Amino acid sequence: MSETAMTALPAPAPPRRMGHASFWLATAAAAALIILALRGIGSEYAYFAATFVLQYVVLATAWNILGGYAGYVNFGAAAFFAAGAYTTVAAGKALGFGLLPCVGLAAIVGGILGFGTGLLTLRLRGAYFAIATLCLSVVLQTAVTNWSYVGGSRGAYVIRPRDVPFGFDSYGGYLCALAVVLAAVAVALARTIETSRLGLGLAALRDDEMAAEAAGVPTLRLKLIATSISGAMMAVAGAPLPYLGSYVEPNSAFGLAYAVNAIAMPLIGGTASWAGPLIGAVLLASLQQAATVTISSAANLMIVGVVLVVFVCVAPHGIIGLFRKRI
Amino acid sequence: MNEIILRAENVGKRFGGFTALSGIELEVRAGERLGLIGPNGSGKSTFTNCLAGAFTSHDGAFTFKGQPLAGLTSHQRARRGLARTFQLPRPFRGLTVIENIRVPLAYGGRQPATDDAAMACLEAVELAGKATRLPKELTQVELRRLELARATALQPALLIADEAMAGLSHTEVDQILALLFRLNASGTTVIMIEHVMRAVTEFSQRLAVLVAGRKVADGAPADVLAMPEVEEAYLGR
């Protein structure tokens, strides 16, 4: 046999990354600055608009853990979001819980729902998985619409507590600060997953499930972990919703806007990185909030549609993809 | 003589009414270099998929390192030291070359998923210089080397190289052969599934031949290639 000499090229140095602890600290510092800045503005509208944007940061980041990192497109984001909202309603009514315990409970409910979804769809991929998640949304909405304890189709009113916790100037300010913290935790958690062993396994699973298995990756277990974490975070995004408008009903909680935005925002920002959903959510949600004030709330989904079409044609890997060669 | 590392007993696989494999009996000894050949559609890849756990065989059983493989998933078999490459390279396209190697290092559980370990795997296949590249930037032979590096990162006891030389030039075939010889010299048993007969005869200590899902020959390469039924399978009557 002829051994052919091959020229070995020098190995390039692998890129350096910020450590997990440093990133969590940086995110906490950024969150504190945003809370202080909003407190400085002190306007109820600023609180509302920021909360609106931030709930989408959590929702889009959560969707991206399954849809972006693992490549499983979830059309049922609204179901998880509404599950969080109705957990707040049910736990508040049944147990007298305030918002913070309800957020924790929503995470558990969303996690269980995500785990169940993953378990029922273990062998489904692509369009079949997407359709299954869409069905979940329809089934859950029908169940809530017929559950009179949480208001059924009439909806439920949630009265904001008279006492504002933690010395905030208004309950809107408190809700906004909570949304900032939830968004910061969601982003830091997504980045931690992305740069961890779990993220590596999810990326392998996304690119080629059979090759991932051959490389020792337990793809079914990873899929269950991703559906559980993603479900928990999406439910957390929805948990403050009843307090935001003091009223929640099935058509709005399971609204098309949540399902579409949860997908569109990561796609526009870029699904391969934690920064993609953050950028997409801030951009799209801000645009929608501006359109609501200046034109009409009816223009929201049209804006999402137009921006999505433009990005699919011009930047299929999202805004992040324009700046990174790896995609 | 070395102990038997892999035993296939009466393995069969059907797809609907089509029988892809029937009554396959095969023994492979530790450290051996076995060539598995046969015309297109003879069941070589189906056999590989059944052995690696991608398909479930309908009949028979595999025993690997004395333990039955029945009921184990692909990743569990990989972790036990049974690695494979694919006929068409299947890199993780969103990951860089070094990240492709980190996957089996992180999940194979046989060595630490450090940069040093990943670079060592890449150096062994002469890909260290392209560690931060994406698979789409690699040539065909580099993709084949990446496949081999990803499989060897599992530190396998048995490697199934499924047509690792398909579509490569004479020189590139020599490069892959050299890699497989080095791997075998380090103690890994290798099953080579190949159509490039020069490579098969040069590499294999023993040849097994599949035709229409059945094993028709098993023995020394020169003897097997001289058998009329093998000649007929390749060249017709």
Image: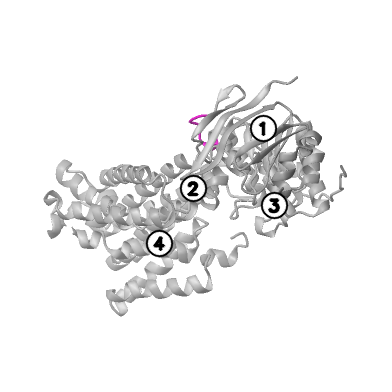
Is A316 part of what is drawn in magenta?
no
Which mark sits nearer the N-terminus, 4 or 2?
A: 2
The residue marked by circle 2 belongs to what chain?
A: A
Disc 3 from disc 1: Cα separation: 21 Å
Q: How far apart in space, not on screen, are marks 1 and 2 (Cα)?
A: 43 Å
Q: Is residue B73 magenta?
A: yes
Do badges 4 and 3 share one subunit?
Answer: no
Inspect the image, locate mark 3, and give the three-letter code of the amino acid beneath it. Leu
- Numbered circle sitting on residue B158: 1
Dot 3 falls on which chain?
B
Residue at x 14% of width, y 58% of height: A153
- Count neighbours of disc 4 (C-alpha within 10 A) and say few if under 14, some if 14 to 19, many if 20 or more: many
Q: Reply above or below: A137 against A291.
A: above
- Please report contact status of discs 4 and 1: CB closer than 8 Å, yes or no: no
The circle on residue A263 is 4
Q: Position of residue B158 (x, y in %)?
A: 67, 32
Find numbered disc 2 in the image and state the secondary structure of the residue it sits on.
Answer: helix
Q: Secondary structure at mark 1?
A: strand
- Magenta stretch secondary structure, dominant: loop
Q: Residue furthest bottom?
A: A295
Residue A86 pos. (x, y %): 22, 51
For the N terminus of chain B, give its image quadrant. Answer: top right
